[in-house]
Amino acid sequence: TGTPAPTEPPAPALGQIAMTFGFRPDGTPDGSYASVPAGAGSVYVATRLTGLSVGQKVRAIVIDAWGNEVATPEIVIDPGAADRWLALPVALPAELAPGQYGVFVFGDDRPLGSLAFGVTSAGTSAQLLPELPANPQVRSTVPPPGSGSAPGQPTAASGQAAPTVAPSG
């Protein structure tokens, strides 16, 4: 009798996906955007995943309309909640060509879901999706995940559910 091979954990399930510029104190995206301007710094592929296991790799592949890879942020799941938001940063350089883009999310190389979004010219405004209303006039005082805390803001240590952030670069 042979020794059974270790079983791989099941793939996580994708609950929601959004393009966002930041997160609320409870760890949810602060708006979901249909388009983002080139030159705006970074945008996050925010993914709400369930059934995460320690050691699983979640990555996003961002492509342009011609299928060229623009970014491939990834994160290895650490101990924590099995159901949580993840933040995968994508740089938006000013020279990024305006047009349609897509993001494909994978868990351990298994496809979980995708989202189409637009990139507009540098200096234009981001277009907020209507189904997740937010007031774009009021900027969030919560810093992007992984950049430290703004003074007086709740952190994960104070009981808030901060999203897990992939390293930049």
Image (cartoon, rainbow, N blue to C red):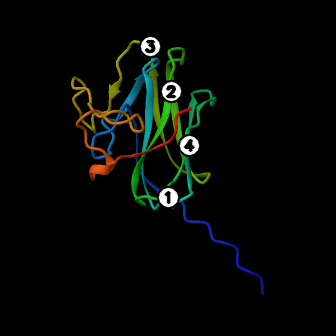
Query: In the figure, 125 relative to 71: above or below?
Result: above
Residue 156 marker? none
Mark 3 / mark 4, whichever is N-terminal: 4
Spatial distance from mark 3 to mark 2, Cα to Cα? Answer: 13 Å
Residue 74 marker? 4
Q: Circles 1 and 4: CB distance less than 8 Å?
A: no
Q: Where residue 53 sits in the image (x, y, percent)?
A: 51, 61
Are there few (<14), some (14-19), or many (20+) residues within 10 Å of tag 2?
some
Q: Which residue is at a point 31% across and 50% down the rendered structure image?
A: 157
Quickly name the residue at label 3. Answer: 122
Spatial distance from mark 2 to mark 1, Cα to Cα? Answer: 25 Å
Disc 3 residue type? Ala
Asked whether 143 or 45 is in front, the reply is 143
Mark 1 / mark 4, whichever is N-terminal: 1
Q: Quadrant of residue 36?
A: top left
Position of residue 88 in the picture relative to residue 155 (left or right): right
Quickly name the residue at label 1. Answer: 12
Asked which secondary structure carries label 4, the reply is strand
* Residue ranking furthest to the bottom: 1
